[in-house]
Image: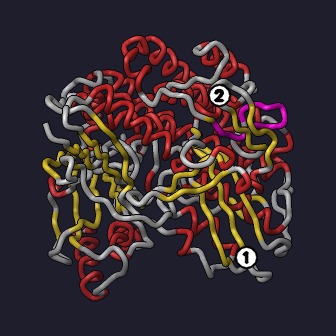
Amino acid sequence: MEKRKLVIEPVTRIEGHAKITIDLNENGKVDDARIHVTQYRGFEKICEGRPYTEMPALTARTCGICPVSHVISSTKACDNLLAVRPPKAARNIRRVVNLAQIIQSHALNFYHLSAPDFVYGFDASPEDRNIFKLMQTNPDMAKDGIKLRAFGQKIIEQLGGKRIHPEWIVPGGVSHQITNEQRDNILSQIPEAMDIAKRTLKYFKNNIHKFKKEIETFASFPSLFMGLVNKKGNLEHYDGFLRFIDANGNILENGIDPTFYKDYIGEAVEKDSYLKSPYYKPMGYPEGMYRVGPLARLNVANRCGTPEADEEFDNFKNLNNGKPVLNSFYYHYARIIEIIHGIEKIEAILREPKTMGDNFRSRAKINRERGVGCSEAPRGTLFHDYEVTKDGIITGVNLIIATGNNNLAMNAGVKQVAQEFVNGSNITDGALNRVEAVIRCFDPCLSCSTHAMGIVSSAIEIRDHNKKIIDVIKRS
Amino acid sequence: MRIIIGYGNSLRGEDAFGVDVISLLQKKKLKDTKLLSQYQLTPELSLELLEASEIIFIDALYGTDNYALACDITNNQNANLSHHIGPKVIIAMLNNIYNRYPKFQIYSMVTNQFDIIKNKKEYNRCLNLIASYLSK
């Protein structure tokens, strides 16, 4: 048999546009497989020449899904340009909004993007394995997903003025303080949100045994992990320090001020994708592959720091006897634990008297010509790095988006799954679905993360050993 | 109650059609009607539609027959679920999850201009046509 290339396009139930190519060798076995991100955004160039004050609103447009994450990192970069630390009330409210974003995003990934696979299995027909079927057979599950997402979205809307592209987080703090009514409204929704999160956890744990093979093969390999941790080494989403660990849990780097991220992270560009490939610089490219996001955050953290989440965190850590969990299928598990943590943390912050303080914004002029902002987005660590003139006009922008950090690992995962499940002589829909599903574990947001120049790819193709396309598989 | 949802990105030229129709309708005092302006349709929007007996979606629809008006939900291609969704999914959510069966319609303006408003006169004609029809 001659070499063939199999292409899956578009990759479904993810954010943005991508295709997968699978190269088959002469024996019909998978030789290689890659994900190609086929859309280009170019925000790093668009922003040049704009006043720094526009950056939070401008970069929020990078994404309609996680704009809050961009606003948070962008305003932190602007804080850095001003050389100010926002008042405690502002930092707390920013934390609440950031956690709300993480909760709503995780809820949608779990309930609506991934649940059809959990409920019907990866081999179910596409006619059955979709949200419409889920709504018919498991309406309560779909309802839970909507409610939990609404919980997060309403917090963003209440505090930020609107759910998508809120404009209330500004350089130096926030534009207005939180009212007692807003606080009480959010607090009143906490019990129901927590009930849903616990139901979700129970469902996942009761059904995880069905996916033994997927757990073993869905991007299950040694890699580094990176994430923010606080001063105690616990889970952190807003501030803190970068920590890198290896696959055995050894801490490679700790307490890194994110401002100095370039000393530790290199950015490679592949010719067949618009998505950058960041790597851990001391190990070089591509050996410095690392993972970010919920799984990585729990792997690098000592604890979650909230009681309910910590109870489950112990079980998570036991999956690999205290060592990092290497199976990317457990991104789903980590997401649920983060939802629980997020709900607990939001409640704790809102009950802090300082959150209600009336000092919510620091004002200053440009005091630095470079500013870096870093936070944890739903999908992982997000960096905004700005250079400005002394008048605050942007002269350079570098963005490392959460999804981009996972690019090397996603590619390695696609190859691993393809080699395990795809047989060139009998390509089943279940096999192709698994190849997509491994990407879904990372919950990539490709719209956000494509800022690097590359060559446009546009199809999912099967190619022979001469790179001639012999088949194209379209999925919708 | 009738709920009219106009959705689109106001920064993207004629994609803002639905949002602009809502702006026009806000100037009229429509009885028993709730107006919603949305950047995109999202799953949790279904919670705001539980009280609706009739839902009208207004959107820009990609096509080459610019400034034609369409009212066929089968033309709306975004049936997949993502962080943003199409009218079909919203209606399916109301039917299957909440046992609500409102009447629904979709009004679309066909365009291939998502960067600018290419023909302001034609764009306004479409806006006024839909707005006056819905005001009757």
Q: Quadrant of the C terminus of chain A?
A: top left
Image colouring: secondary structure
Task: Name the residue: 86% across, 56% down.
Answer: A359
Of the numbered discs 1 and 2, the one sitting upstream in the chain is 2
| Label annotation for residue A154 | none
Start-end of magenta stretch:
A225-235
The image shows residue B100, relative to residue A123, as above or below, that is below
Q: Horizontal and vertical percent for residue B43?
A: 39, 43
Q: Quadrant of the N terminus of chain A?
A: top left
Asked if residue A94 is among those painted magenta in the image, a careful observer would answer: no
Dot 1 and dot 2 residues touching (CB under 8 Å) = no
> In the figure, residue B27 lies in which quadrant?
bottom left
Q: Horizontal and vertical percent for residue A235?
A: 71, 33
Q: Which element is circle 2 on?
A: helix
| Label annotation for residue A299 | 2
**Any part of residue A192 in sight:** no
Q: Horizontal and vertical percent for residue B88?
A: 24, 46
Local crowd size for mark 2, using a 10 Å CA cut-off: few (<14), some (14–19), many (≥20): many
Badges 1 and 2, same chain: yes
The reply, left or right, for residue A209 in relation to residue A228 is: left
Task: Name the residue: 41% across, 60% down.
Answer: A271
**Any part of residue A226 in sight:** yes
Identify the residue under disc 1: A388
